[in-house]
Amino acid sequence: ENRIIAKRDEIQCLRDEAVAYIESIQDSLTRQIIYYRCVSLMSWRKVAYEVGGKNTEDSVKKIYYRYFDKLESCPECPD
């Protein structure tokens, strides 16, 4: 039982770190997309519905993947 509690606490800590990172994203649409997909674990269709506008599954996927592709090629990122 102690192992389960320790693992739960570890997972909660990681979730809190992820949420803090997501909250630091400047663009609100990108922030919402990443939150819904990574924290709320929504499908792409549900993410598109939640952010609204004329966003489609494909458009929110593109925003999501472009954000992370940009991070990988960012000169400020450590190797």
Image (tube, rainbow, N blue to C red):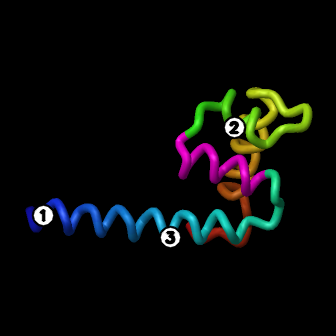
Instruction: Identify the residue at image location x=72%, y=35%.
Output: 61
Residue closer to the observer: 64 or 73: 64
Q: CA distance from mark 2 to mark 1?
A: 34 Å
**Which numbered disc, 1 or 3, marks the residue that appears first in the sequence?**
1
Check disc 1 and report the residue beneath it.
3
Distance from the alpha carbon under mark 3 to that under mark 2: 21 Å
- Give the percent coordinates (x, y) of residue 42: 58, 37
27 versus 56 height, above or below? below
Which SS class for mark 2?
Answer: helix
The crowd level at tag 1 (other Cα within 10 Å; few <14, some 14-19, many 20+) is few
Give the residue number, with chain letter if any, for mark 2: 47
Q: Of callouts 2 and 1, which one flags the residue occurring earlier in the amino acid sequence?
A: 1
Q: Which residues are magenta?
A: 30-41
Q: Position of residue 60 (x, y in %)?
A: 76, 37
**Does the magenta run of residues contain 12?**
no
Going by the numbered disc 3, the residue's amino acid type is Glu
The amino acid sitting under disc 1 is Arg
Q: CA distance from mark 1 to mark 3?
A: 21 Å
Q: Which residue is mark 3?
A: 17
Among the 4 quarters of the image, the one containing residue 7? bottom left
